[in-house]
Every structure is written in structure tokens, then in C-alpha cells.
Image (cartoon, helix red, strand yellow):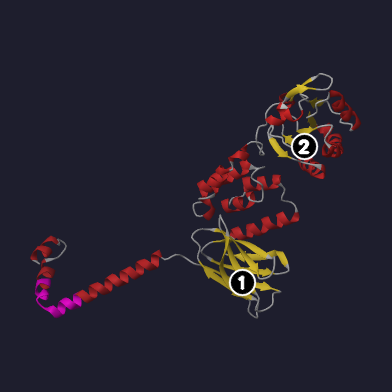
Amino acid sequence: MDLLFHKTKWLTPFTYKLMKKSIKNSFFLYILLGIFIFLIKNSNSLSAQKESPKSFLITGTMKNLNPGSKLFLEHITPRQMYFIDTSVIDDLGQFSFTGNVPLKSLARIKVENSNNNFLIALDNEKINFIGDIHDMNNYSITGNSESEQIRQFAINMRSGKGTATWIKNYIDTVKSPLLAYLAVNQLKIKDEYFAFEKVANRLVREGKNIIYSGDFKPYVESQSIYKNFSAGFEVPNLIGNSPSGNEYDLSKLGGHLVLIDFWASWCGPCRKENPSVVKAYNKYKEKGFIVFSVSLDQNTNSWKAAIEKDQLNWEYHISDLKGWQSQYSKLYNVSSIPQCFLIDENGKLLAKNLRGEVLLAKLQEIYGF
């Protein structure tokens, strides 16, 4: 016992003598032991409180929903959507949800037996929701600014404003990486691989507190097969001869918006699509719009006759007259026609497989009329 006290250098001489005498008194020893145990237990309790996870509390009012109706709070994770909590609407239209999430994520408030749901940003915090079951656009959330941004984004998407071009611009300008993640998932990765890659890299840099940051980049990398011929991809060059023997080189058309159009005289759907291409060309040719036609024909006369009959009155027509064995179709991974690729002034892909009114709408979006 003396050795123990000797090693405890912070004991004063007075305390040392007092404790030596106290040890001889078993009653006093038990008191000290009890105090020690009490302090340890309370210390553990305080530590546990500090380390316990934070919780969220969502309180709200849902107008025009009958008392007794159920609302569900569902968590949108990288792999699935799962139930967190349920609440029953009271006579005043009020409800509440409680729980906790490991990281910030997207969630939705869903009405039972209805397709109506309200998307929110979910974190461990107190927020208040006010909504109307008959009006999906006009709801408010206080305590979480990202949820208000989500509401505005949803309004734009429902209004038809959310084209691929608009969404990609939104991704580039929105401050929240969570909103960028929401936006990019309105696109198709096979057509917009580089937009997905951009958001995945951003989540790694800025999204340590977002649940999607760990899984999204590996997912995008697993889909890298779509990197070729996604928007932003620099397309391969095409050089070939027209029916009259003129050679045309795609790379020499830099500075122009170009539609690379794969077709053939023997292809019924292609011939039905040609009037839309002609309409687009005639409307925008004065703006420098070019159609670069690639035919999978095998017969020069048939090819030339179809050009004249369908009034494909632009200069750029090429073919190697090898049908489905064409070097051009292999280069562009074309396995069905009609198929087209719209490229910008730098030879990078803007969009593909634009047909009919979709083609005209895309050009109107670009040219503004």
C-alpha cells in the first residue's frame, strides 16, 4: 500500500497521511469506494449521452387530408427505399415523424393509398412541414434550406422545363452536392455518362456527410462502357465519298452544329423519318446547321434515287456501299437505323437518337426559335 501511494506523485503529504489512517478504518474505505463507483457510473452515462446519435423531428400540417389518414416517411438509400416512421393525421391535420439517419439523404413523405409524395432532404434536425394534398407544388419546409431547393427543382421538372441541357446546367451551378445528385439521376447514364462522372467526383470531394457519397462513384465507374458516345464524347472522324464521287471529311466541319444521320434507301423507318430531317435542315441551314448523311446502302443507284426522291438536298452524303459491314456503322456502334448523332462546333456529342419532333425541339432549344 505504501508503494502505491509513493508512486502517486500528485498526493500532498497531508492527503497521504490522511489516506493511510483511513485505510485502517474499513467504514471510511467503503464510503470512498462507493463515491468512486458513483463517479464512474455517472461518467459513463455522460459519455454515452455525448456519443448517442442525433435524431430528427419532423412536425407538420397536411391540408385537405381526412383525420385518421396515414403518412409514411420513407428513406431513399443508394440501393433501396425503406420505411422509417408512420404518422396519423389528427383533427387539426397535424402529424409528426421521429428517428435518426446515419448521414444526410433524400426522403419522401408519402400519403397512404396515393401516388402523392413530397421529396425532402433528411438530416438529424428539427424541421416543420406545411403542405396541401391537392397541391404538390406549394408546400414549405422550415429548418432545411435544401428541401426548399428540392421543391423548386421538382416544379421545374413537372413543368417540362427540365430538359437534359437544363439539368446539366443545374448540376454545374447548384451549390448543394445533394441536389446535384438528385438532378443527375433524372438523366440516363448511357447518354450522359460524363454528367454522372462529374457528380460522382463532387460527392467524393464535398459529400462526406451524404449517404450516397460512398456508393455512387463505384457505380458510375462500373458503367464506364457508356463513356463512349455519351454527351461530351468527341466522336470519331468520318471520311467517305458521295454518289458522284466527291470526298467529304467530317473533321473539316468544325465550327458548325452537325447532325450525323445513319440511314439507307432500303430502310422503311429511315424513309419515314427523312421528312423530319429535311424540315430541320431547311429551318436552320441559314444558321450554319449541317446534315452529314451516312448511308448503309450497297447499290449506288438505289442510294442516289432515294436522296433525290426524299429531297435530301444537302451536300454531305457518304457511304462505303458495304451495308451492315460498313466501317462507319462499326466505328459508331450502330446496330439499327435510323440513328443520329448531334455534335457541337468542337465535334463533341450533344445528343443522339433524336427523331421527329424531338429533333426539332432540341434544335429550337439550341437556336432559340
> Callout 1: 10 Å neighbours few (<14), some, many (20+)?
some
The residue indicated by pointer 2 is: 337
Residue 53 to residue 173: above or below: below
Whether the magenta-drawn stretch holds residue 62 is answered as no
Of the 4 image quadrants, the one containing the N terminus is bottom left
Q: Which segment did they paint magenta?
A: 19-32
Place of residue 175 in the rendered image (x, y in percent of width and height, measured from the top left): 59, 50
Quarter of the image where one finds residue 228: top right
Drawn side of residue 280 relative to residue 231, left or right: right
Q: Main secondary structure of the magenta part?
A: helix
The residue indicated by pointer 1 is: 60
Q: Amino acid at mark 1?
A: Gly
Is residue 368 something that shows in the picture? no
Of the image marks 2 and 1, the number of the one nearer the N terminus: 1
Is residue 166 something that shows in the picture? yes
Q: Element type at marker 2?
A: loop
Q: Nearer the viewer, residue 267 or 229?
A: 267
> Callout 2: 10 Å neighbours few (<14), some, many (20+)?
some
- Foreground: disc 2 or disc 1: 2
Quarter of the image where one finds residue 272: top right
Q: Element type at marker 1?
A: strand
Q: Nearer the viewer, residue 36 or 275?
A: 275
Place of residue 115 in the rendered image (x, y in percent of width and height, measured from the top left): 70, 65
Residue 133 to residue 318: above or below: below
Q: Nearer the viewer, residue 197 or 38?
A: 197
